[in-house]
Image (cartoon, rainbow, N blue to C red):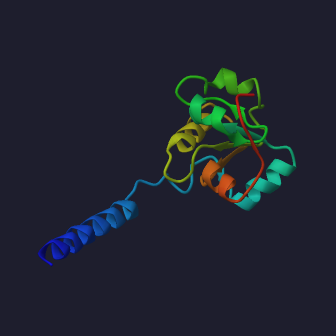
Amino acid sequence: MKFFRYFLIISGFFICTSSYAESTKWRSPETVAGTETVTLEQAKTMHINGVKFVDVRSPRQYKKRHIKGAIHLYINDAFTEQNLLKHVKKDESFIIYCNGAHCSLSYKAASRAVDWGFTGIKYFRDGFRAWRLDGNALEYGAQ
């Protein structure tokens, strides 16, 4: 009986601390100055209409799966002004995404693109996770 009581106390401690940790996780900003934040529904409509998607996640994540047709420019090496210009014009609409609200990559990429003078940036804060969980089109492997 004593063991069971200790087990319950310890279990309760871990449940409480993990719930607290989950609620205090870092979240990316909801907006990025100079961009338009888009919802999942807006992103889906833009995808249907041929707006380009730029995936700034790691090569491993991109290769595993990504939004269908997405351009891969990993933020830590390939996401440069010159490389972005190979795919979109400075005034063209395009969507930047990463893994979602707990990922900082799309926030950082959107900020950089604003600094480089791009004006059609759509910041898809909910990103790949929301896209995948909604059952939208994915591709597997590097393109």
Q: How many marks?
A: 0
Viewer can see residue 37: no
Res 16 → quadrant: bottom left
At horizontal 63% and vertical 50% (from top left) the residue drawn is 127
Q: Quadrant of the N terminus?
A: bottom left
Compared with residue 123, is residue 56 higher up or lower down, i.e. above or below? above
At horizontal 86% and vertical 44% (from top left) the residue drawn is 50
Compared with residue 29, is residue 20 higher up or lower down, i.e. above or below? below
Measuring from the top left, give residue 64's x and y in whole percent.
64, 36
Depth order, front residue of 19/86: 19
At horizontal 57% and vertical 54% (from top left) the residue drawn is 31
Q: Quadrant of the C terminus?
A: top right
At horizontal 46% and vertical 55% (from top left) the residue drawn is 27
Residue 104 is left or right of residue 35, and the answer is left
Viewer can see residue 105: yes
Compared with residue 68, is residue 130 higher up or lower down, i.e. above or below? below
Measuring from the top left, give residue 7's x and y in whole percent.
21, 70
